[in-house]
Image (tube, helix red, strand yellow):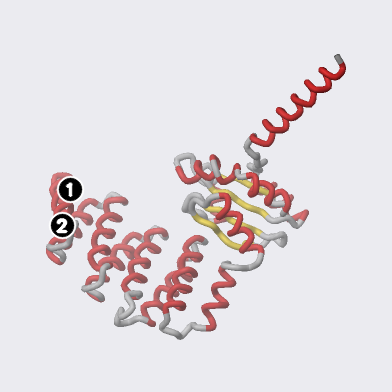
Amino acid sequence: MNNRFFLTMIIFMVMFVGFSMRMPAQIAWESDWAKGMKDAAAKQHPVLLDFYTDWCPHCKHLDATTFKEPKLVNYFKTEKYVLIKINPEKDKGAESKFKVFSYPTLIVYNGKGEEVDRILGYLSGEELLKALDDLKKGIGTLDDLLKKQKKIADQQSKENFELLSMIINKYIARADYTEALALVARIVELDKDNAMNKASKAIFQKGYIYYKWKKYKEAVEALLAIRTLYPKSEEAPMGYLTAGYYCEKIGDKPGALKIYKEFLVYFPDYSEAGKIADKIKGLEPKTK
C-alpha cells in the first residue's frame, strides 16, 4: 500500500513539473510609470518601457509571443529590469514626457536613469534579447553611432551614408526632428548631384520627418521639390504620390486632387498612372 502511494505521488509530481515547464512565462508589468521609474532609480535598476495602443497589431503580437519567451523573461529577472506598460493614448502625460508617437516603441533606461535607446516595431524574443544585450554593451546606441560617424563625417562613402541614415532614424524615434533634419541636409550636401541616389532619398525622408512633426505644408513641399531637384530619381514620382496621400490623410482633398493631376502630367508613363486617374475621378465630385 505504501509503495503504491509512493509511486502515485512520484507520478503526480513528474506530471506537475512537466505541466509547469510548459506553462508560458509571465512578466509582472508595472502600470504606474512614475512609480516604476522612481522605484528603479532608487534601486539603480534598468527599465524597459513598452508603449502600446489597443489598436496596434504588432503590440498585441509582442504580448502574445515575444514577452512570453522564457529566455527573455529570465533575462529580465537576471538583469533586474523594471518593466512598465504605457498606453499613451490614455496617458497624455506619458506621451508628452517621452514623446512616443509610433507603436510599439520600447524605451530602455540604464541603472543611472539615463535613456539608452529606443526599439521600434516588432521583434521576436531572440531578436529583442540580442538587442538588449547589445545595448548593455553600448553597441548600436545613438552615442555609439555618433562616435562612429564622427570619424568619417566628410566621406562620401556607403558606410557614412548608412550611419547617417541610422542616426536619423534614432532621432525620429526620439521625436528630435530638428537634429534629424540637420542630418538630412548633411546627406544632400555630400551627394549634391545624387550620384549615389542618397540626396533624393534623404529629401523623401525629409517629407516624412515633417509629416511626423505635423508640419504638413512643409512635408508636401519637400516631397514635391524632389521632381525639380532630381527629376530622374525614383523618389520624384514617389514624392508626388506620397504628398497626395498626406493631403488625403489630413483631409485636404483639393490639395490631393491638384497633386494627382500634376502627377499625370509629369509622370504619364508611371506604373501607377491608371490608379491615380481613377483616384482623380473619385476625388473630383468631393471637391466641388
The quadrant of the image that shows the N terminus is: top right
Q: Would residue 253 appear left or right of 159 to someone viewing this image?
A: left
**Residue 173 placed where, x, y %?**
49, 60
Residue 57, visible in the rendered structure: yes
Q: Disc 2 on helix, strand or loop?
A: helix
Q: Would residue 260 appear left or right of 63 to someone viewing this image?
A: left
Q: Disc 1 on helix, strand or loop?
A: helix
Q: Nearer the viewer, mark 1 or mark 2?
A: 2
Residue ID at (32%, 82%): 192
Q: Which mark is residue 283?
A: 1
Nearest the viewer among 16 and 164 is 16
Q: Quadrant of residue 227?
A: bottom left
Label 1 and label 2: CA atoms lie apart by 15 Å
Up-down relation of residue 32 to residue 12 (above or below): below
Q: Which mark is residue 273?
A: 2
Which amino acid lies under the numbered mark 2 shown in the image of this protein? Ala
**Residue 90 placed where, x, y %?**
53, 42
Q: Residues within 10 Å of mark 1 (few under 14, many from 20)?
A: some
Q: Residues within 10 Å of mark 2 (few under 14, many from 20)?
A: some
**Residue 146 placed where, x, y %?**
55, 75
Which amino acid lies under the numbered mark 1 shown in the image of this protein? Leu
**Residue 67 placed where, x, y %?**
59, 44
Up-down relation of residue 237 to residue 193 (above or below): above
Q: Residue furthest right?
A: 2
